[in-house]
Image (cartoon, grey):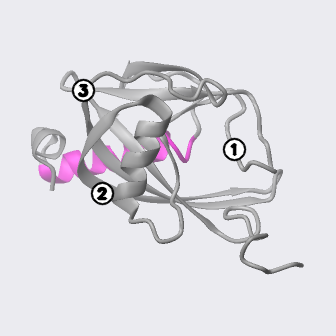
Amino acid sequence: MDTSKSSLRPGKDSIGLCVGAVIMDNNGRILLIKRKSLIDSNKLRVGDGEWSAPGGKVDFGERVEDALKREIAEEIGLEVKIKKFLGYTEQLMDNSNLHWFLLHFLCEPVGEPTVMEPEKIDKLGWFQLDSLPENVIHEHVTRPLKMLKECSESYGNENTRKNGP
């Protein structure tokens, strides 16, 4: 295998690092994006028409928080305030030989989202926690929401959602 720096692809040839945002508004709704229907192992895009939290890859030399804000702005044109680190998940996709380590953050939106990458995103939507769409990516939505619930139970829902750590 060619191990030169330019040929290695994070998530494919080595473990990739990603960030994801659980963006919650003042009404307790979360923002999800519906990714285009594809799994492209060359471009390392994951989706297959499923709903996901916004986010993406951390570039080499980039701070995690900066990557989160950049990815959110690139995907949905939204500025966010990072309120709390929720935890991490690991995504191993044997069918496409991908391996990602995902860091999840609770964020507050500043402004209104809009799809900025229509080639990657079909649409976006706000959802109540008890009425999420059925086809969500488990590692991107379900598990981070479980982390959020655990934080809320430990620190009180109002404190976690509005005041951060």
Q: Is there CB contact under 8 Å for labels 3 and 1?
A: no
Task: Answer whether residue 131 is visible to the viewer in this image.
Answer: no
Which residue lies under the disc numbered 2?
Answer: 85
Which residue lies under the disc numbered 3?
Answer: 28
Please state if 117 lies on the left or on the right of 161 as rendered: right
The residue type indicated by label 2 comes to Phe
**Percent position (x, y) of residue 137?**
59, 38
Q: Earlier in the sequence, mark 2 or mark 1?
A: 1
Q: Magenta segment range?
A: 138-155
Which residue lies under the disc numbered 1?
Answer: 45
Nearer the observer, disc 3 or disc 1?
1
The residue type indicated by label 3 comes to Gly
Tally the numbered discs. 3
Where disc 1 sits, the SS reads: loop
Where disc 2 sits, the SS reads: strand
The alpha-carbon separation of the residues under discs 3 and 1 comes to 29 Å
Residue 54 circle label: none
Q: Residue at x 67, y 64 (%)?
A: 10
Please say if 58 is above or below 7: above
On-image quarter of the N terminus = bottom right
